[in-house]
Image: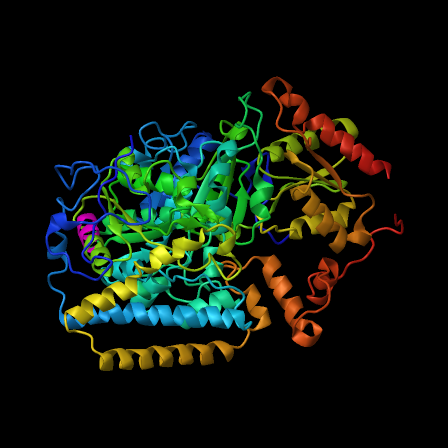
Amino acid sequence: MLSVTEVMQLLTPAGQRITVASQAMSPGPSPAGEPCPPSANAAAAGELTVADIDLPAQIADLTDDDLVGLYRDMVLVRRLDEEATSLQRQGELGLWASLRGQEAAQVGSGRALGAQDMAFPSYREHGVAWCRGIDPMAILAIFRGNSLGGWDPAEHGFALYSIVVGAQTLHATGYAMGMARDGSPGAAIVYFGDGASSEGDVNEAFGWASVFRTPLVFFCQNNQWAISEPASRQSRTEIFHRASGFGFPSLRVDGNDVLACLAVTRWALATARAGGGPVLVEAVTYRMGAHTTADDPTRYRAPGELDAWRRRDPIDRMRAHLGAAGLLDEDRERRLAIEADACAHDLRTRCRSMPDPEPASLFDHVQVTDTGLVSVQRSAFTAAPGDGGDGPYVQGDLDRRSGLVTGETRVSGQAW
Amino acid sequence: MTSGAVITNGQRADAGAAPAAPAPITMAKALNLGLRAAMAADPKVLVMGEDVGTLGGVFRVTDGLQQEFGEPRVIDTPLAESAIVGTAIGLAMRGYRPVCEIQFDGFVYPAFDQIVSQLAKLHYRSAGRIRLPVTIRIPFGGGIGAVEHHSESPEAYFCHTAGLKVVACSNPADAHLMIQQAIRSDDPVIFLEPKRRYWEKAVVDPRPLTELPAADTTELHRSMVARAGTDATLVGYGPTVRTCLDAAEVSAADDSRSLEVIDLRSLSPLDLTPVLDSVRRTGRLVVVHEAPSNVSLSAEVAARVTEEAFYSLEAPVLRVTGYDTPYPPARLEDHYLPDVDRILDAVDRSFGF
């Protein structure tokens, strides 16, 4: 019943570059089944295989500097991620959701995006954010409790983080509909995980995007775990198989292979931009860390599992490839390490010196046009002693102080 | 009174200088004209929902819009309420002004997360960078003999949610005006249409918002005195405004009591100025709605009137509402829904204090 196509790759876990399309490898520790024949037409609904897409051609333009740049992105993002984890442990952040292990999926897909495209993240897409020019401090501010989303989505082509898993797939679908109507040259991409694939919203988005042929790439990072639940608890079929039931093409890529992720995302975006409708990409990867800093994966993961995935580490793989190609020597590695430490130091400094927001800012931007209630509460709050409002909120008291209640008199002598 | 026009028997007294006095039209038709005017005024306005296109909506509120404005602007959607709202959010982020129709009140709950966690909060989450001018039209309330899930009053859920604006029209003229104002609002608006009043008729000034005199005097979030009175105050919204007006009529004839009727129109934000003005004159207040009483609009009105006009009250604020049961089978709905007798009983109780 279950047919599993091969996982698209351009780098083996040992870092060997695959240049012949049919050389694709098995996905490794994740469950694998039997191969199925490639579909005849890449544009038709169905699962795509390496025979349908000339993967090497998708990245044929990459220069040596580009290749090193992808590596640099991954190294810096991991270093920043490590720093954020430390900051959480030291009490500077309330929580952190580490992307460790998913750098290739995020940097590969993120670097496939153009300025005309729009990305809709979930809450772990720090690597995509990096590619879109988001200041990492803006992300830390969310986990520190200073903001709910601190960047301009329009400026960066990067929507706000979405914590209710899967909800953003519908926003992306609508946004992509709007892009098509506007004749935009771009496409949208939406990130979600194996857990979110069970949500109704994701399935509604699949159906809707397919019916309206919206220019949208569904990019599922299957990191094998939704907190404690394995991907097998979400689905009896491979996630990328689901697209065929909704009538649009899908493929599965080695999510720890930055080159393959870049190649397939470029292809999927080009398909979407050209009016080919949505594409589902399942990037098979692994959440090497905990779900968040509040999680303890030793309670649910087998001890050897992480070791198996460590041998498929996305950064080690690219390092091996660049080393073999003569593009990365010890000096370049050392300079990159210094750069990463400097970025981390800068992030730490800015995080620790970040002041709390102004208390009264909690009333800002509730609506474009404030309701009377918010205005009244803000007035009373700012008038309160200490400006922090440590007294209990009392509506009637508040209304008197704000002057809302004036001239109140009894209309008769009878009280009750 | 600061809140604009007085309407009597559901008809705006100062609707004024309509060019030619047209025949009375139904509320459904008035909404249709309002939608048409909004679509003509702004090419970014889209109508989307189940059966809104070819069919013209199950209540025909969107009748003819697809023929006039084309399929791209009047979209028959998949049966996926969460997606209707969720994609409207994405379209709004892209600069559109979607008007979503949820076919019946009881079908809005699959969209609840998108409304409450996304639509209501994205402006706040984005520190004001994202604006979501999305209107969600929901036929609500009972009284049409429908099957389950077709007669509910979900307004309190939305009023409880910061970031949403919630309004309910009660008569054709308001329906025509308010739908255009809601679509023009830069904030998301839950637009509740009392489905059992869809076929009630009144003369409506058919001109678009920009030419409507009422638009200048009556903001979307203003409550209005629907019938002036001196002895006690009735507050209703949506379908119960008509019931309150009928009660006032009966009370005047049978009991020689002069009941003031106030149509809230806007449920969030609440404009209680006319209510407080009225209570300061009458000293007695009865709030009427179809929704259950527990943690409801009437609870909020009672609390705030008590806080702000305590010394004016001659009696506790009383409430006439649907019961705290699920909506019953249609053969029992006449017992469930507030009617003239129950309202007048409450008025009597108020005078008994």
Colour style of the rendered protein structure: rainbow
Q: Is residue A28 left or right of residue B341?
A: left
**Residue A120 in picture, x, y percent from top left:** 35, 55
In front here: A167 or B162? A167
In the image, the segment drawn in magenta is A266-272
Q: Is residue B344 above or below residue A293?
A: above
**Residue B322 in picture, x, y percent from top left:** 67, 31
Q: Is residue B300 above or below residue B345?
A: below
Q: Is residue B325 left or right of residue A101?
A: right
Asked which quadrant contains residue B208, the reply is top left
Asked which quadrant contains residue B226, the reply is top right
- Quarter of the figure with the N terminus of chain A: top left
Asked which quadrant contains residue A112, the reply is bottom left
Magenta highlight on residue A166: no
Q: Is residue A78 left or right of residue A387?
A: left
> Can residue B36 be seen at all in this image of the molecule?
no
For the stretch drawn in magenta, the main secondary structure is helix
* Total marks placed: 0
> Can residue A232 be seen at all in this image of the molecule?
yes
**Residue A246 in picture, x, y percent from top left:** 29, 35
**Residue B35 in picture, x, y percent from top left:** 39, 40
Q: Which residue does the image show at 34% across and 43% down from the upper left?
A: B46
In front here: A54 or B169? A54
Q: Which residue does the image show at 41% across and 27% down from the upper left?
A: B58
In front here: B169 or A308? A308
Q: Is residue A186 above or below residue A73?
A: above
Q: Which residue does the image show at 65% across and 22% down from the upper left?
A: B334
Give the residue at the far top of this rendering: B331
Q: Is residue A355 above or below residue B139?
A: below
